[in-house]
Amino acid sequence: MRPFVRRLVPLVVAAAAAGCDFQPDPEEGPTALPPTRAVSVRVEYRQPPGCENADRPNCVDPVWFLGSWMHAGEEVVLESVPGSYVWAGTAHGVPVNWPPTDEPHLVRVYDPHLKDTATAGVTAARLAVGGQLLTVYEQPGTPQESGIVYIDDNGVGRNPM
């Protein structure tokens, strides 16, 4: 081999080795989820006067609040506000989704006073979440009726724009 080529071979090998990665790559995994901010939110529901049930004993049962972020067993039992038709409570751990960067939350109550109606007791009408009276609904008048709401960092509800 020529002396020039002999000196060039180690340089070529060194240059090629510098571009090689001899460390094994780590196993690919899912990317980390961004941390979710959560707040507590005041919920108020104004129950219509009277009881629509043929089975009157159900008319003393409490009202339950349900949100799309909740898992089974996380429902909130609302308490009756004495001297009114209002039921109120606080939902804890509500994910913040305002400004709207995510899907809105779907919320509703189960009111046993309305069990024998077309909605089978499920409603989002007359529901205020985070101080916001809900005005936008999905599937109104059905057992799947839900109100649509966004929640900000202060626990204030916002209707969709």
Image: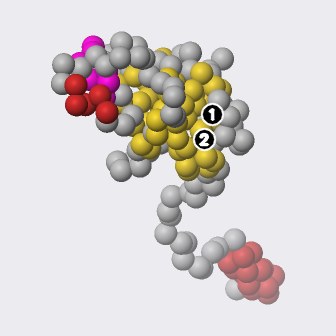
Q: Nearer the viewer, residue 104 or 109?
A: 109
| Image point (36%, 30%), residue name | 110
Residue under numbered circle 1: 130
Residue 10 location, x and y as percent? 74, 84
Q: Nearer the viewer, residue 5 or 54?
A: 54
Residue 137 location, x and y as percent? 48, 17
Q: Residue 60 sits in which quadrant?
A: top left
Q: Verify CB contact (< 8 Å) between mark 1 and mark 2.
A: yes
Range drawn in magenta? 112-118
Q: Residue 62 sits in which quadrant?
A: top left
The count of marks equals 2
| Image point (36%, 50%), residue name | 73
**Residue 20 part of the magenta-drawn span:** no
Residue 50 location, x and y as percent? 35, 17
| Image point (53%, 72%), residue name | 26
Question: Which amino acid, by three-letter code, is at mark 1?
Answer: Gly
Q: Earlier in the sequence, mark 1 or mark 2?
A: 2
| Image point (56%, 21%), residue name | 134
Question: Which amino acid, by three-letter code, is at mark 2?
Answer: Val
Image quadrant in which the N terminus is located: bottom right
On the question of residue 143 being in view, the answer is: no
Tell me the SS state at disc 2.
strand
Residue under numbered circle 2: 41
Mark 2 residue crowding within 10 angstroms, few (<14) / some (14–19) / many (20+): many
Q: Nearer the viewer, residue 127 or 139?
A: 127
Image quadrant in which the C terminus is located: top right
Q: Nearer the viewer, residue 127 or 53?
A: 53
3D distance between C-alphas at marks 1 and 2: 5 Å
Question: Does residue 36 appear left or right of residue 88 in this picture?
Answer: right
